[in-house]
């Protein structure tokens, strides 16, 4: 068993911990939160006794081998680096860091300290994502793809009311492309690799982050259009088009349904566990057992960060972390 701790006590942390219960390779051993009471309340749900409100103490605890990090985006870099330098394996929620400079530095630190660093981008480890990859050839020569993820944020009204929620605050390295837009970019990179050229535009909010935007990734004779938004909704599926057919994907982050339209219309969807984070948890544990980071995952993580950093440059989205 691999004893792990969590940094953060929100809903996504709880979902990840529940995902580890699907596979018994990971065992929740400790909880960190800024206040000890919050950590204790979260820990009590899983019968965990070890709680921290001191990150340095957590990083030096010999009872912990790995750490799951789900703190605000802007804190990922310092939290991940501290754990890596103290010999902890780390799985960190996407985005791994605020920009490509930080991402490169974190992977260098992981290598230097002989530990695993893994970005928690769940989509690439889903059975239905594998179905998409394995059936792309049936579309013939690929020509176009439209990757869509637009979801009205539950926190947008707070922003409109004059509050400054993390979701729309540049000090937390947030905004549409860093949140749900990340799924679209990483999904594309995981399937098709590094694009040859990037174009992007966005609607910037007064806070300085993007509320929504569009991206065009050019692969030569194949292009991918991405639409992302946190200030509007869409029910459109994502689509990949080839000269011999097309493929529809429902909810790109979860790959809930995959329909192949080639010689005939075929539903190629596989059953997936209701907790989609269970797959990334298992993949993280497997890397620790093997003692080696998965090279394709590292490459995808770096390219995705580089592409999003360029998208932000093109659209004028700047974070305080970019000046560090």
Image (tube, grey):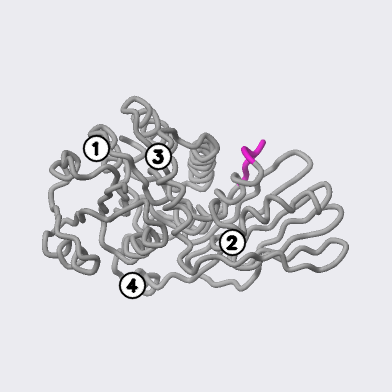
Determine which of the numbered discs, if any, sits on residue 158 in the image: 4
Mark 2–mark 3 Cα distance, whole angstroms, equals: 30 Å
Mark found first going from the N terminus, 4 or 3: 4
Precedes in sequence: disc 1 or disc 2: 1
Q: Nearer the viewer, residue 292 or 168?
A: 292
Q: Which mark is residue 289?
A: 3
Q: Quadrant of the C terminus?
A: top left
SS category of the residue bearing label 1: helix
- Of the pair 256 and 27, the residue shown nearer to us: 27
Could you tell me residue 10's position as x and y percent?
29, 64
Q: Which residues are magenta?
A: 193-199
Query: Which comes sooner in the sequence, label 1 or label 4?
Result: 1
Disc 1, disc 4: CB below 8 Å?
Answer: no
What residue would you read off at disc 1? 82
* Quadrant of the image occupied by residue 207: bottom left
User: Dot 1, how many residues are within 10 Å of its Cα: few (below 14), some (14-19), or many (20+)?
Assistant: some
* Distance of label 1 from label 3 (alpha carbons): 22 Å
**Disc 1 vs disc 4: which is toward the camera?**
1
- Label 1 to label 2: alpha-carbon separation: 33 Å
How far apart marks 4 and 3 lie (CA) works out to 44 Å
**In the displayed structure image, the side of residue 319 where residue 262 appears, left or right:** right
Sequence-earlier tag: 2 or 4: 4
Q: Within 10 angstroms of label 2, few (less than 14), some, or many (20 or more) residues?
A: many
Q: Secondary structure at mark 2?
A: loop
* Label 1 to label 4: alpha-carbon separation: 33 Å
């Amino acid at each position: 068993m691999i004893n792990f701790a969590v940094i953060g006590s929100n809903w996504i942390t709880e979902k990840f911990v529940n995902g580890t219960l699907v596979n018994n390779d990971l065992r929740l051993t400790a909880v960190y939160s800024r206040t000890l009471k919050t950590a204790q309340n979260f820990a009590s749900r899983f019968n965990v006794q070890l709680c921290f409100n001191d990150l340095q103490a957590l990083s030096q605890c010999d009872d912990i081998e790995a750490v799951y990090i789900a703190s605000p985006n802007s804190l990922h870099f310092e939290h991940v680096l501290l754990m890596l330098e103290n010999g902890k394996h780390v799985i960190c929620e996407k985005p791994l860091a605020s920009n490509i400079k930080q991402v490169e530095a974190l992977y260098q630190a992981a290598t230097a300290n002989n530990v695993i660093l893994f970005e928690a981008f769940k989509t690439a480890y889903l059975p239905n994502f594998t179905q998409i990859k394995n059936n792309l050839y049936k579309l013939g020569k690929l020509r176009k793809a439209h990757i869509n993820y637009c979801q009205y944020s539950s926190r947008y009204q707070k922003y409109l009311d004059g509050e400054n929620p993390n979701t729309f605050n540049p000090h937390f390295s947030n905004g549409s492309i860093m949140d749900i837009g990340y799924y679209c970019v990483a999904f594309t990179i995981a399937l098709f690799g590094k694009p040859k050229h990037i174009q992007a535009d966005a609607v910037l909010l007064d806070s300085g982050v993007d509320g929504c935007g569009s991206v065009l990734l050019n692969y030569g004779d194949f292009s991918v259009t991405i639409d992302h938004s946190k200030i509007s909704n869409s029910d459109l599926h994502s689509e990949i088009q080839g000269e011999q057919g097309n493929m529809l994907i429902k909810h790109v982050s979860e790959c809930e349904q995959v329909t192949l339209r080639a010689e005939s219309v075929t539903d190629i969807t596989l059953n997936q566990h209701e907790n989609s984070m269970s797959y990334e948890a298992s993949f993280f544990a497997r890397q620790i057992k093997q003692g080696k980071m998965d090279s394709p995952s590292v490459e995808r993580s770096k390219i995705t960060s580089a592409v999003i950093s360029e998208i932000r440059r093109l659209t004028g989205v700047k974070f305080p972390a970019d000046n560090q």
